[in-house]
Image (tube, rainbow, N blue to C red):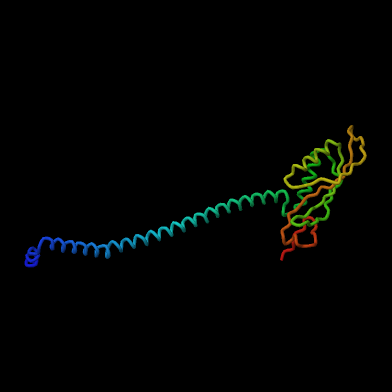
Amino acid sequence: MKTLIENFNRVPVGTRILALAIVAALITGLNWYFVIDVVDKEIATKQASLAKLNGELVEKKKIADNINQLKKEKELLERKFAEALTEMPAELKLDELLRQLSDIGRKSGLQILNLEPGKAKVEGFYASVPIKMQVTGNFHETVVFFESVAKLRRIVNIGEFSFGSPAKKSEKVVLTTSFLATTYQFVPRNQADSKTAKKPGQKSASK
């Protein structure tokens, strides 16, 4: 090594500088090729992987947002459907409705003369159930009855009025009123497709 250094010192200064420059360039090139280039490639690979993960994260966030929105819409539809079933129940519960009509009539001051349900008629997704009613009382009591029925959560339409001749009874003028109270029942699709209308309150036969 000492001899090599002595021989190197005998070389002209310009040649020594050029040799050192070549060695330095060679070391720099080898360092870039074996170290820096490998690190740069690894960084580029990591950056591409990170960009891909960020893209997947954005897509999954969009899906999650859509799912949350769909859940909210589903809950809203379920609430609206529950409210609709209150107005038009899937189970007719005719006996309960008849009791309600009787109670409303008595509280209004009317005397119930007739309360007769008719045959249900399927009309698409619902069935209409007519109830023939005949009551007696004065005009004000009859109007109060109609107003109370209109305030029921469940749909009950009053129509086909027929008024009898007024008569004086117990110091008041009363009249007999006949009318049709029509309520409705929600019919599932498989039952709505049936051509045969069921009787009021009739349940589907179990399989």
> Does 171 sit above or below residue 103?
above
Q: Nearer the viewer, residue 119 or 38?
A: 38
Q: Position of residue 109 (x, y in %)?
A: 82, 38
Say how many tags the image has: 0
Residue at far top of view: 171
Identify the image quadrant of the C terminus. Answer: bottom right
Residue at x-position 92% and y-position 37%: 167
Q: Splitting the image into 4 quarters, where does residue 198 fall?
A: bottom right
Residue at x-position 62% and y-position 50%: 76
Identify the image quadrant of the N terminus. Answer: bottom left
> Does 102 sit above or below residue 16?
above
Q: Position of residue 24 (x, y in %)?
A: 19, 62
Q: Splitting the image into 4 quarters, where does residue 142 fall?
A: top right
Q: Splitting the image into 4 quarters, where does residue 194 fall?
A: bottom right
| Image-based side of 36 in relation to 133, left or right | left
Q: Position of residue 70 (x, y in %)?
A: 58, 54
Q: Position of residue 204 (x, y in %)?
A: 74, 61
Q: Nearer the viewer, residue 66 or 29?
A: 29
Residue at x-position 30% and y-position 63%: 37
